[in-house]
Amino acid sequence: MKPATKFIHAGAAPDASTGAIMTPIFQTSTYVQEAPGKHKGFEYARSQNPTRKALEEALAIIENGKFGLAFSSGVAATDAVVKLLEPGDEVIAANDMYGGTYRLFTKVFEKFGIRFIYTDTANIDNVRKAVSEKTKLIWLETPTNPLMNVTDIEAVSIISKKAAAWLCVDNTFASPYLQNPLDLGADIVMHSSTKYLGGHSDVIQGALVMNDASLREKLYFIQKSCGAVPGPMDCFLMLRGIKTLHVRMKQHCENGKIIAEWLRNHPKVSKVYWPGFSDHPGYAIAKKQMRDFGGMISFELKNDSLEETMRVLSSTKLFALAESLGGVESLINHPASMTHASIPREERIKNGLKDSLIRLSVGIEDAEDLVADLENAI
Ligand SMILES: Cc1ncc(COP(=O)(O)O)c(C=O)c1O
């Protein structure tokens, strides 16, 4: 199927009992069995739910994978992947990624004996050098949140295969409309579905997609044993969001380009981070592995005092000051004090995330209105 058809029809079959075109919300905790063990494939809703099943099938299709698993949040999906590991195992991860992932790795999993090695994965040599016989997982985020660094997924997959380690790619920023990591050699794709997949800022949810059946069994075992499953209403909302992913993403990309170029020409702006600029260090790789460049942009002001940064952040009217991203409405965010506050300041600064960095999630409103709003604020 071509992308538009895929996003609309993925996982959607008319309800067998009524013909309802939309998957019903199976709001149930359990299922009646005819005799012990004699059932219709559904025993207890932490393990199986028909609305979640439809969503999981849709997730697999839109990421060109065989199996999908839905979780109660993006971090719950990440948590499930790390639970594949044993004490003593090592993980190589990007040194610039979503703060909550960093917090989960360092504050929750390090104490269980898992070692995390953070490096600039955009430089493939760094990944190669970080590999040891204990490496079991390579965790990539590309483009990264919030500095928009790009890593060559295919090149890292060659390294991970040689090391017999899993490669998991957080594909939240790109969405499956722009990038499909499994096609580039990744073993697992992870999403904070909360963002572009849901697309309407009304659901918290996560997803994993993979091709390998034994890996699916391991992750399904973790999903049902640890229990971080999404409710059926949220699965319904996610199925609905996915149907318009392609039309939303087209507009996010179009508006993103307009805003990135406008910001770059603004006399008060010193630096704009967006992988669609031909002089962005990751441009060639982004062009190779992404279909377009998305609507996530970060920038710094020439007057990079915290006072001026805070003034701009508080002055927009359309861009709402809020965490999260990927919804139809535009958001403005201060990574240092909001989404990435869980990363120690010196660690952040070392990796290029300044206190003055402003991140935009460009929505799908009229670009002219968005530009006027930023012009007023800046
Ligand atoms: C790139 C990325 N990965 C993972 C997450 C975590 O997802 P969730 O908030 O759905 O738990 C986020 C949330 O902002 C994110 O931006």
Image (cartoon, helix red, strand yellow):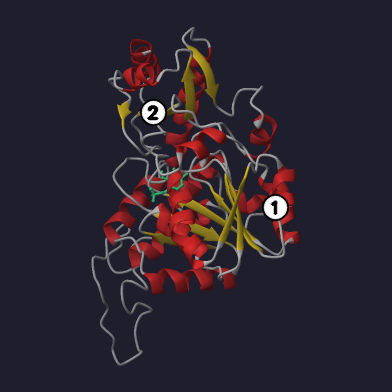
Please tell me which residue is depicted at 52% across the width and 58% down the height of the picture.
209
Image location (x, y in percent) of residue 338: 36, 36
**Helix, strand or loop under label 1:** helix
Residue farthest top in this picture: 267
Viewer-side residue, 119 vs 170:
119
Q: Is residue 71 left or right of residue 149?
A: left
Task: Bin the neighbour count of mark 1 within 10 Å (Cα to Cα): few under 14, some 14-19, many 20 and up.
Answer: some
- The dot on residue 54 is none
Q: How many marks?
A: 2
Name the residue carrying label 2: 364
Looking at the rendered structure, the kind of residue marked 1 is Ala
Please tell me which residue is depicted at 50% across the width and 29% down the height of the picture.
253
Front: mark 2 or 1: 1
Q: Is residue 98 left or right of residue 309?
A: right
The vertical placement of 131 against 177, above or below, is below
The vertical placement of 312 against 282, above or below, is above
> Quarter of the image containing the C terminus?
top left
Name the residue carrying label 1: 130
Q: Is mark 1 within 8 Å of ligand 1?
A: no
Image location (x, y in percent) of residue 207: 45, 56
Sequence-wise first label, 2 or 1: 1
Image location (x, y in percent) of residue 100: 42, 48
Res. 22 visible in picture? no
**Helix, strand or loop under label 2:** loop
Looking at the rendered structure, the kind of residue marked 2 is Ile
Viewer-side residue, 51 vs 335:
335
Please tell me which residue is depicted at 58% across the width and 73% down the height of the picture.
214
Q: CA distance from mark 2 to mark 1?
A: 40 Å
Image location (x, y in percent) of residue 45: 31, 72
